Amino acid sequence: MQNFWNERYGKQEMIYGSEPNDFFREQLSKLTPGKLLLPAEGEGRNAVYAAQQRWDVLAFDYSDAGRAKAMQLAAQKGVNINYEVADAQTFSATPESLDAVALIYAHMPPTARTTLHQNIMTWLKPGGKLIVEAFHLKQLEGYPSGGPKNEDMLYTAATLIEDFKGMQVEYVKEEEIELAEGTYHLGKGYVTRLVASKP
């Protein structure tokens, strides 16, 4: 999979665009800037936007090519981001060090997903926020806007609520939306959205 993403991110174009995800931008605007983690951050569109909003941004992805494009975008926008090349099962953060974590289309196999989600709950400070937007199982029913073709890597509300058991769910919805995020997230999609906080 690392080679797959290096090849995809190795293209000159920003394949998911250079603007942040709409739901992420909307939810971030409700929070006081602090320390934010963005796993599976790819080309850095959300990280760079958050840094422009005065967040202290930590991001990771296992694609070197994704990191290179993220750092280039940050330089173009005149902001600093901390971006590591790591995978979901090896990345580590200090317990109770994060004010927010955003999982924006952070699709991964179940074992890696479970590990990361459990760690996120440890890394968040009490009162810390979690923001999630990801493709739902219904995305496989002919929606044209991308995403994994493996149902084990897709999310229902029930999956997320179970994974983040113990957190306070503030918003959760499964819905059809219109995506316009570069070449690979374009058209109608079916997504799961979640906002939760650590007690």
Image (spheres, rainbow, N blue to C red):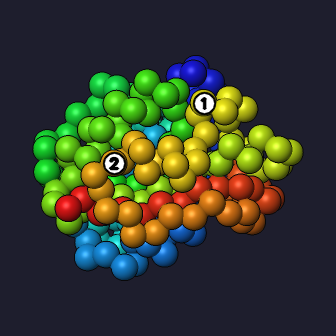
Q: Which residue is mark 1?
A: 152
The front one of 115 and 70 is 115
State which mark lies toward you, 1 or 2: 2
Q: Which residue is mark 2?
A: 165
Q: Is residue 90 above or below residue 159?
A: above
The front one of 95 and 86 is 95
The front one of 158 and 184 is 158
Task: Report whether 81 appears left or right of 9.
Answer: left
Q: Residue at x 47, y 56 (%)?
A: 132
Q: Position of residue 174 (x, y in %)?
A: 63, 60
Task: Report whether 155 appears left or right of 96.
Answer: right
Q: Position of residue 101 (x, y in %)?
A: 33, 54
Which class describes the residues within 10 Å of circle 1: few (<14), some (14-19), or many (20+)? few
Tell me the SS state at disc 1: helix
Which class describes the residues within 10 Å of circle 2: few (<14), some (14-19), or many (20+)? few
Spatial CA span between label 1 and label 2: 19 Å
Task: Report whether 177 appears left or right of 60.
Answer: right
* Residue 43 at least partly seen: no
Tell me the SS state at disc 2: loop
Q: Is residue 99 above or below residue 122?
A: below
For badge 1, the amino acid type reads Asp
User: Hey, which quadrant is residue 193 in on the image?
Assistant: bottom right
Task: Report whether 45 appears left or right of 52.
Answer: right
Q: Position of residue 116 (x, y in %)?
A: 35, 36
Q: Is residue 78 above or below residue 108?
A: below
Count of all numbered marks drawn on residues in the image: 2
